[in-house]
Image: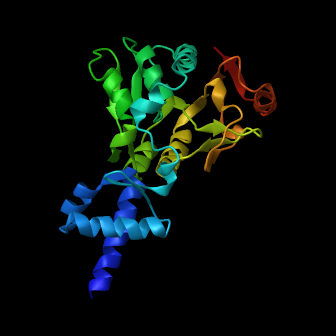
Amino acid sequence: MLLDVRQHRHLEIVQRLRVHGVSSVDDLARSFGVSASTIRRDLQLLDATGQLVRVNGGAVSPEDADVGRPFAAVAVDHVESKRAVAARAAGLVDDGCTVLLDIGTSTQLLAQQLRGRPVTVLTASLAVLDALRDDPVVELVLLGGFVRRPYHSMVGVLTEDALRQVHADLAFVGASGVRADGAVLDTTLVEVPVKRALLGAADRVVLLADEHKFPGTGTLRVCGADALSTVVTNPGADAQTLAVLAENDVEVLTA
């Protein structure tokens, strides 16, 4: 019986990390009503079998292990390139538009560009919420879901269901990278279903990707070039990848 209880706890720990990305030993011990030393033994075993990755004070999901830096750390990467992309993308938004903003650092910068504009913003990004929460002009709609605190985002079936209930004029999507064949990639398992649901909720899909993501890498395929209407990037983006996008009738804008 003890073995069955432990196996059930292991399954719950792995599932929690898939949703939230990261959890601490103390939080897990409180949730399951066991000692911290028991949780540490659980994490050691699950790490050895490849079901999670142990970090100082807790664990992260394998999908997040390679990109385990918190949102604040990622936000300072290539910030000027991202800011230029966001400013160019903001020019695509007309007053009165309804826009969907994806999870990520580029969409946070785009949200800042939309402050004071008479637009409606739908999002599962807590970073976008922070950028617009005090703006009296923007109509802000926050989609539900499980909160992934390290990434300032909400994910899961509640978020995906909410996206099936809404419609936008424009959806702005981020990515980990764009492959040479134009495929859009991401590295975070739990965010990919949200991105895919977002693609189907707008008339026009705009990919925000700075030059360093061309060509890029990622664990999972979000979509092909045929799902995109427009790509906004920087002049230094890989020319061959951009040519493939253009061949697939994707509008390429540089900033």
Please state the horizontal and vertical placement of residue 251, each as a whole percent of the image: 71, 24
Please state the horizontal and vertical placement of residue 49, each as a whole percent of the image: 49, 70
In the rendered image of this protein, does residue 147 appear above or below residue 128?
below
- Number of numbered discs: 0
In the rendered image of this protein, does residue 19 appear above or below residue 93?
below
Residue 119 left/right relative to 193 = left
Between 29 and 170, the one lying in front of the other is 29
Say which residue appears at 80% left-offset and 33% top-offset.
244
Splitting the image into 4 quarters, where does residue 166 fall? top left
Residue 33 left/right relative to 229 = left
Splitting the image into 4 quarters, where does residue 92 fall? top right
Between 148 and 88, the one lying in front of the other is 148
Is residue 196 at all visible to an observer of this figure? yes
Say which residue appears at 72% left-offset and 29% top-offset.
250
Is residue 99 at all visible to an observer of this figure? no
In the rendered image of this protein, does residue 7 appear above or below residue 194?
below
